[in-house]
Image: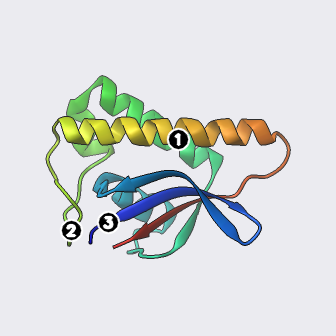
């Protein structure tokens, strides 16, 4: 039990995972703020644009370059089984994983060229 998350691509009726995360609460908070107008989300596929993926990647890069900015750019949040709210090495490992997932998503967008790609953030807790 806990916060499970995915960055997915939609193909027809299916949502195929690009990356899967567990208890990365800063990502969930970011998605609720940026993709869902500050509203709580659970078991929803929230559309994410290429620009939003690039923004998230940049925020991850900034935090990795200067971890003191973590609380401002990608703050942790508490919640029922949402994992740690510490800004330590596990947090930075999650930031790296999210950055890498954003890179994968950007590569998918580039590979599709003119064809629109439907990306989504999904969570279950």
Which numbered disc, 3 or 1, marks the residue closer to the eye? Answer: 3
Q: Earlier in the sequence, mark 3 or mark 2?
A: 3
Q: Which mark is residue 62?
A: none
The image shows residue 20 at horizontal and vertical percentages of: 45, 53
Rendered image coloring scheme:
rainbow
Callout 2: SS: loop
The image shows residue 111 at horizontal and vertical percentages of: 76, 37
Horizontal side, residue 86 vs residue 106: left or right: left
Q: Within 10 Å of the Cα at label 2, are there few (<14), some (14-19), or many (20+) other Cα atoms?
A: few
Q: Within 10 Å of the Cα at label 3, are there few (<14), some (14-19), or many (20+) other Cα atoms?
A: some
- Residue drawn at x 37%, y 64% is 4
Quarter of the image with the C terminus is bottom left
Quarter of the image with the N terminus is bottom left
- Residue drawn at x 32%, y 66% is 3
Horizontal side, residue 116 vs residue 54: left or right: right
The residue singled out by tag 1 in the image is: 102
Q: Earlier in the sequence, mark 3 or mark 1?
A: 3
- Residue drawn at x 48%, y 68% is 36
Real-space Cα separation, disc 3 to disc 2, in angstroms: 6 Å
Residue 80 occupies which quadrant of the picture? Answer: bottom left
The residue singled out by tag 2 in the image is: 81
- The answer to which of 25 and 62 lies nearer the viewer is 25
- Is there CB contact under 8 Å for labels 3 and 2? yes
Horizontal side, residue 91 vs residue 43: left or right: left
Q: Which mark is residue 3?
A: 3
- The answer to which of 38 and 87 lies nearer the viewer is 87
Real-space Cα separation, disc 2 to disc 1, in angstroms: 24 Å
């Amino acid at each position: 039990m806990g916060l499970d998350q995915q960055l997915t691509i939609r193909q027809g009726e299916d949502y195929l995972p690009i990356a899967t995360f567990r208890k990365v609460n800063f990502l969930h908070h970011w998605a609720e703020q940026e993709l869902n107008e500050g509203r709580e989300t659970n078991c929803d596929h929230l559309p994410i644009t290429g620009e939003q993926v690039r923004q998230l990647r940049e925020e991850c890069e900034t935090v990795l370059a200067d971890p003191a900015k973590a609380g401002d750019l990608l703050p942790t949040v508490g919640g029922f089984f949402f994992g740690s709210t510490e800004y330590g090495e596990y947090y930075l490992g999650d930031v790296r994983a999210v950055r890498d997932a954003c890179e994968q998503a950007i590569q998918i967008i580039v590979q599709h060229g003119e064809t629109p790609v439907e990306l989504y953030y999904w969570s279950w807790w």
